[in-house]
Image (spheres, rainbow, N blue to C red):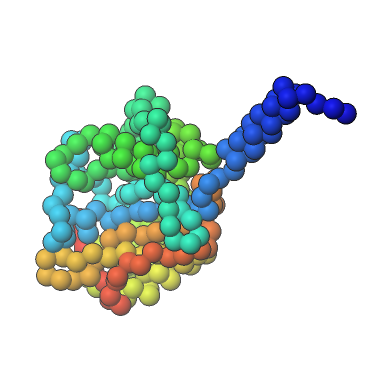
């Protein structure tokens, strides 16, 4: 069968379109880090001050920091789609839950929109092959509900009482419930104490299942860490 130049061009365009659709349907990252932070450590650090949201002091619970696409080699994508801007109307039905579970503690005091906008535009846009804007935030909230870190630690007699606990005991308490070792990140307070700050869990690209971390973040924690009050 013979093709003229016009037919050949059409075939080439169809092939390009096919592979473009195929690539768009596949995740361009390997897993998520689901990151929760302890507000007591965020507010008790020598590096920055904290301000409560305009809705008032958050409850003494771990709060969401983010849901971050990552690659297995330790690199990560960011700001993947400048045209996909944060739209508060997209998440209007999630607002109450976001204010409770994903509050901003940065200064000046805010209503959270700046924080959520940053997380979506830097991280969320890199997961659009899997999650749209509403699903991105809803998925993080479901993961927070699925993994209640404070309850897990309290059940292991690890309390936010300004006491010191072995890092190993914290890791094992979380691993016993999730079946996977978490990544731990600590900060330093003004006295130089290593404090439990953030917990990283790895999640598959659909955002539904906790998985073994392909690579763990370097958290610089001491072998014994303080669990500060909030």
Which of the image's four quarters has the C terminus? bottom left
Q: As rendered, which of 118 and 177 lies closer to the eye?
A: 118
Q: Position of residue 22 (x, y in %)?
A: 64, 38
Whether residue 209 sits left or right of residue 161 in the image: it is right
Q: Position of residue 155 (x, y in %)?
A: 39, 64
Does the rendering let one see residue 43? yes
Is 92 situated above or below 81? above
Whether residue 9 sits left or right of residue 106 in the image: it is right
Q: Which of the 4 image quarters holds residue 157? A: bottom left
Query: Residue most toward the front?
Result: 5
Q: As rendered, which of 220 and 198 lies closer to the eye?
A: 220
Is 175 situated above or below 148? below
Whether residue 101 sits left or right of residue 212 in the image: it is left
What residue appears at the point 16 percent right and 39 percent down from the top-left corner? 109
What residue appears at the point 28 percent right and 56 percent down from the top-left corner? 38
What residue appears at the point 42 percent right and 53 percent down from the top-left corner? 76
Q: Count of labels shown?
A: 0
Q: As rendered, which of 102 and 33 lies closer to the eye?
A: 33
Which of the image's four quarters has the N terminus? top right
Q: Position of residue 30 (x, y in %)?
A: 53, 53
What residue appears at the point 50 percent right and 60 percent down from the top-left corner? 72
Q: Which of the 4 image quarters holds residue 102? A: top left
């Amino acid at each position: 069968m013979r093709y003229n130049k016009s037919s050949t061009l059409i075939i080439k365009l169809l092939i390009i379109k096919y592979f473009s659709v195929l690539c768009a349907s596949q995740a361009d990252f390997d897993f998520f880090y689901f990151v929760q932070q302890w507000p007591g450590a965020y507010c008790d650090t020598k590096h920055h001050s904290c301000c409560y949201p305009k809705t008032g002091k958050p409850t003494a619970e771990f709060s969401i920091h983010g849901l971050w696409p990552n690659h297995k080699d330790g690199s990560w994508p960011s700001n993947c789609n400048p045209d996909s801007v944060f739209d508060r109307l997209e998440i209007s039905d999630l607002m109450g839950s976001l204010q409770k579970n994903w509050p901003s503690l940065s200064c000046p005091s805010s209503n959270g929109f700046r924080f959520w906008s940053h997380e979506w535009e830097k991280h969320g846009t890199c997961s659009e092959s899997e999650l749209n804007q509403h699903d991105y935030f809803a998925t993080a909230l479901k993961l927070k509900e699925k993994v209640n870190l404070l309850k897990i630690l309290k059940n292991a007699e690890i309390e936010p009482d300004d006491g010191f606990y072995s890092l190993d005991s914290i890791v094992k308490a979380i691993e016993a419930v999730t079946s996977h070792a978490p990544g731990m990140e600590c900060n330093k307070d003004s006295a130089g104490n290593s404090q439990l700050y953030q917990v990283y869990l790895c999640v598959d690209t659909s955002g539904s299942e906790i998985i073994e971390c392909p690579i763990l973040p370097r958290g610089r924690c001491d072998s014994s860490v303080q669990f500060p009050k909030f």
